[in-house]
Image (cartoon, helix red, strand yellow):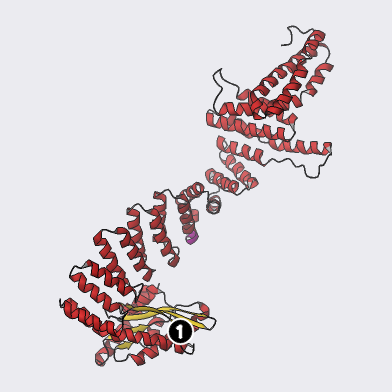
Amino acid sequence: MRALPLVMALSTAVAAAATAQLAAPQQPTQRLLVLPFQAASVDSAGSIALADAVRDRITSLAKAKVSVVAKAKLCEALKASGFPCDGLLDDQQARQLARFLQVNAYITGMYAKTGTTLTATVRLIDISSSGMAASFVATNGNPGTATALAEAIAQRLNTVIRASEPIQACNDDRKKGQFAKAKSDAQKALQADPTSVGAYLCLATVFEAQRMLDSVLFYSKQALKGDSLNSAAWENIARVYQQRGDTVAMLQAFTAQARGEPRNVGKWLGIAQVWRQMKQPDSAVTVIEEALKVSPGDPQLLDLELTICNEASKFACSSRVFLTKFQHDTTLAADTGFLKPAIGAAQQAKDTVALDVFTAAAVLHFPNNASFKRTRAAAYEMRGKLDSALVMLLAALKIDPKDVGTSLQIAQIMVDRAVLDTAGAGKDTAALNRRRAAFAQKVDSAKPYLAPGLNSSDSTQRLAASVIMLTAGSKLAQAGAYNQAYPWLDTLLTIIAPKNAADTAGPRQQIRVNASFWYGLSSVLTLNGPYQDMTKAKGPERCPKARAVFDRLTRTKNALILGTRVHPPTAKQMLGFVDQYEKAKPQVQKAYKCAPSIS
């Protein structure tokens, strides 16, 4: 809002109006401003025509009661401030204009045309105890033209204006302590207008002076029947509940009051702060969200909402607010003080949209920050973009080569994204083997990135590396690539071998059990090659090869026994094959005459 130029321009208008009043004292003391109604762009012309017609008709109907600000004066003030003559003002701008033009009340509202139906939601707002206040809906009029609708609006407004004179008397009498007379004046107003907001509000103030809170509450609620958003009525209601100690009802009343001034950010902030102090973050956030619908991107509202969400550890809420702030302030994209907590909140909330936005900005503005590249990789992973995640992690590792965690993440992704492509292979064994080999090569590419984890002094990182090795080995075995699975699983069982007889529980044992099953399966199904090689060996090679085969059989048998629980039928079948091989041990020993004997 262009408040300062509006103030300066209106000062001239006010001075001119004051001069006119002195020159024409016979004019009514109450001044009324009619503003164009808010409307969609397609209905703006109709809105302006309606306001002009209402202004003209009220001037004619109530010229003895009120002085209506002429359109020329209104245009002069608006143009001086850079507004168009027929500009549609929001609620704050309308209130500001009304105050600087020193009117006692002003008319505003909403206008819409749906087909042949014309609808106006009208508000007459009292800003200086004029007694003129009301809200109502008018439709069409007869015969359904803007002029006819204006007539219906003007007639209702004229009723309210006629009732304002005894209301002013009521207020004067109440100030003098003449309560009985004030009540009588209010009754006169109600006879002229049974839903008179001003009359009920005056009665409420009379009973307030007499400390009769029940009556204050009753008459304030009665006033709402004539204007559901009336600020004074809701203020009275809120204060009564405050005195009764009913904070929730008080806040509900203040919230209803704020809806009549939706752009009054200070009021919304105050309500939210009280909810916050009451440890009711959901209610506080609800209030702020309502305010943001009218004032989107307001920094004060967003800052308070973020504070409340953070205090309550409501990460989804925090992430949403961070994203809203980011969208309304482009400088935050290069602010690490903003990006780091924003990324943290998005990660906690698993908010893929926000995380993608924040990490994209982070790596763009801070290309040499390994941490931001890792979080960008995490964002890609959450969206299933493993190739992009891998690119980011490799870049992060290049910046920080000693980061074991990043190295293990790379290995994990390499293993996870490796998939055996069997499409179109059919029964072509050679083609399927080639595809298995390519698949195994993808899995094997993770080995260099596992080494730092396997050699780490951190047991958690060693365990993580072992899990990745198990995933790789079991994945290869399930794909039928037993020759490639065997070395993965053989190495893994060596790494996680029990440290002592009591080392038979915990996560290492779980890895051991699963690795033993897949090792046993892979070993049995790839043993024929080494066994045949042993039978064909000659000379001094025979015994070492025989010992290697039967040592492997022993390890395989023990592994299958330990891993039986993974899939008992398969383990039992593989143990049968082991028995077949072991039956040949005596014959090999006898034929090879190895010394010492083959164990």
Q: Residue at x 37, y 71 (%)?
A: 260
Q: Position of residue 531 (x, y in %)?
A: 79, 20
Q: Is residue 436 left or right of residue 295?
A: right
- Mark 1 burial class by Cα count in 10 Å: few <14, some 14-19, many 20+: many
| Visible residue check, residue 274 | yes
Q: Position of residue 320 (x, y in %)?
A: 48, 55
Q: Residue at x 15, y 78 (%)?
A: 178
Nearer to me, 46 or 397: 46
Which residues are the magenta region? 327-331
Q: Secondary structure at mark 1?
A: helix
Report the number of numbered marks: 1
Identify the residue under disc 1: 48
Q: Residue at x 32, y 91 (%)?
A: 63
Q: Residue at x 78, y 44 (%)?
A: 423
Residue 237, by quadrant, is bottom left
Which quadrant does the C terminus fall into? top right
Q: Amino acid at mark 1?
A: Ile
Q: Position of residue 422 (x, y in %)?
A: 77, 42
